[in-house]
Amino acid sequence: MEILQGKFIGHERGFGFVKISDEIPDIFIAKNNKKDAMNGDIVEVRILKEKHGEHNEGAIINVVERNTKQVVGTFEKSKNFGFVIPDDNQLGTDIFISKSNFAKAKNHQKVVVKITKYPRKGMKAEGKIVEVLGYAYEAGIDMLSIIKQYNLLNEFPKNVLEEAKEVSKTEIKPEGRVDFRNKEIFTIDGEDAKDLDDAVCVDDNGDGTYTLGVHIADVSNYVKEGSLLNAEAIKRGTSVYMLDRVIPMLPKELSNGICSLNQGQDRYALSVIMKIDEQGKVIDSDICKSIINVTRRMTYTDVADIINKTNPKTIEKYNKYIEHFERMQKLALILKKRRLKDGYLSLEIPESKITLDKNGIAIDVKPYETNFANEIIEQFMLTANETVAERFYWLNAPFIYRIHEKPDEEKIKELNKYLFNFGYRIKGKLDDIKPKAFSQILEDVKGKEEERVVSNLLLRTLKVARYEAENKGHFGISSKYYCHFTSPIRRYPDLFIHRVISKYLAGEYNISETMKEKFEKQAEKYSITSSECEQIATKAERESEDIKKAEYMQSKIGEEYTGIISSITSFGMFVELESTVEGLVRLADMKDDYYIYDDINKQLIGKETGKTYKLGQKVNIEVANADKQTRKIDFILV
C-alpha cells in the first residue's frame, strides 16, 4: 500500500491524524497504529484499506523526525522517581524523571523538562528537569508556562536592544519624501494601544469620489536587511498578545517609539493614496515614501461617540474634526456595501474580553464590544492591502501574498448537513464554490437566534489563511489580490513587503534581475516561516484565553446559566454562554435518558423519550467543574 510522509497531530484521547498537505485530506491514525509517535513528529504512514468517516485510515510505520525537544508540565513526585504530566494533552505521553534529574523541583510544581529518551515499544519518554517555574497558583505562572511551552522569545538579546536604541536616535528629515505634515491625519485604535502603525485621512472631491490616504509606519527605514533587528524579527515573525502582556516582534524603542505614529510627532511612512468612486471601487492610486505628523490620536470609542452623536463632551472636544469623521463613515459604508455585494464574509463572531485583577486572576469574561469605528479602520486597511497587492502583482514583483483558498468540497458537504437543521444550504457547484454562496447564508441568518452558531459553523468550514509567494486570492474577503501591508510593527510579511516596495520606488518600479531573484527566494522562505510563527502565536493566545476562562468559571461552580448548543459530538455537546465561555455537557452526565448520536442530522436523540438536542438550541446549564490546568469546563443540564 501507499506510504506517505507528514506531520502527526495527536489527540488527547489517544488517536490522531497525519497531515500530508493542504491538498490531501488528513489520515486518521487509531491509538494502536500510532507506533511511538508524539504530537508534532514527522512520520511515515502506510494507508490502510479501512475508512474512518471522511478520512483514509493509516498506520505509522516510522518516526522520521522528532519535533518535541522540551516539554512544560506539572511534576508529580514519588520517593525514587517522578513524572511530568505535559500541559499539551495532545503529546501522547507522560515524561519519566529519574531521581537524579529532579533538579530540586517540588511536588506539583510547573517545570520545563528536556527529553532525553523518546517513547519506544510501549515505554514512556524520559527526561530531566531543566527549569522550575513555580506553583500553578502563583501569579503569572500560567502565562509563563505557555511562553515556555511554545518557546516564545520573551526577551530581546542585549545586542538587539543596543541596536534598537541606536536606530531610534535617527534624525527625521523631509528630504526625498512626499510631505503630508500639513494634512489632517488621524490614528484610530483601542484605548490601550501603544504601537500605532496606521493613520488615515479622507477628502471629499466634490464629484462623488473620495480620496483615501492610508499612511503606514515605514519600519523598513529602521529595520535594515542584514541587521540584528531584522534577524530577530524573522525569528519572532509576529507579536503575540496574551491578555496581560505583549511579546513584541520589535523592541519598544521602535514599536512604541520611533516607528509608532504618535500624535504631534514627525514620522516616516509609506503612504497609499486612493481615489474611490461612488461604487466603492479604487479608480486611481499612488504609493509613495512620505513624512507625516498625526493630528490627533483617536480611540474607537471616541470616534463612535462622534458619528453616533451620543456623547456631547466628546463632540465638543473634537468639534473641529467632526466633518472629517463623518466623511470616514460615509466612505466606509460605501466600501462595505461594495464588499458585501462581491461576497465578503462578514462573520459576526465576538471575541472575548477578559479582565484580570492586579494579580493576573480573571475576574470577568464578556464579549469584546466593537462599533462602526472599528469597521471604518477595517474597511480602509482592507482597501489599502488590496490596492498594494494588485499593483505589485501586475508589476510581477517578488511578493508575499495573504491567501485564503476555497474550502474543500467534503467540508462543504459536511457543513450542509449541519445547516439542514436550520433550513439553510450552501448553493452552487461545491467543487468551485463562490464566496457569495457563504455570504448569502450570513445574510439569511442576520439577527436570528442561530446567527452565532451558523457563523461559527461557516468559520470551521473555511481553510486557514496563510502567507505565500504566489497570489491565489482571498476567499474570505472575496478578493483576487490581497496582502498584509498595514502592520509592519507587529508582522514580518508586512515589513518584508515594505522593503520590496521601497526598492521598487527607489528604482521607479524597476529593479535588477539579481535583486528580483534574491527577493523571490526570500518571499518563499519568509512565507513559510511567518505562517508557522502565526500558527504558534494563535495557539498561545487561544490557550491563554482558555486558561483564564476556566480560572474565571472556577468561582462559578454551582451557578446556572442559559446558553446555546454550539457543537454536538459522539461524546456530548458543547454549550456556549453569552459571555463567550464554552463548556461540555457529557453524554455520561445526561441521566434522564440514553442518548444516541445522530451523525447524519448532527443531533442527540433520547432512546426512550425521543427528546432531541440540536445545534443552536437554548439550554439551561449548571457549571459542574472548571480546571485551568486542563483548560476544560464541564456543564450539566438543568
Image (tube, rainbow, N blue to C red):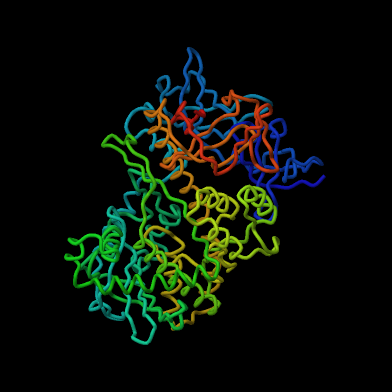
Q: Vertically, is 613 above or below 203?
A: above
Q: Quadrant of residue 172?
A: bottom left
Residue at image position (37%, 55%) is 370
Residue 596 rendering spot, x and y as whole percentages: 68, 32
Residue 60 rendering spot, x and y as whole percentages: 72, 38
Residue 126 rendering spot, x and y as whole percentages: 56, 26
Tally of marks: 0
Residue at image position (42%, 63%) is 226
Residue at image position (82%, 44%) is 1
Q: Examine the rendering and report whether any part of residue 215 can be seen.
A: yes
Q: Quadrant of residue 548?
A: top left
Residue lying farthest to the top in this orientation:
79
Q: Nearer the viewer, residue 434 or 610?
A: 610
Q: Quadrant of residue 318?
A: bottom left
Q: Nearer the viewer, residue 467 or 630?
A: 630
Left-right relation of 174 to 414: left
Left-right relation of 341 to 290: right
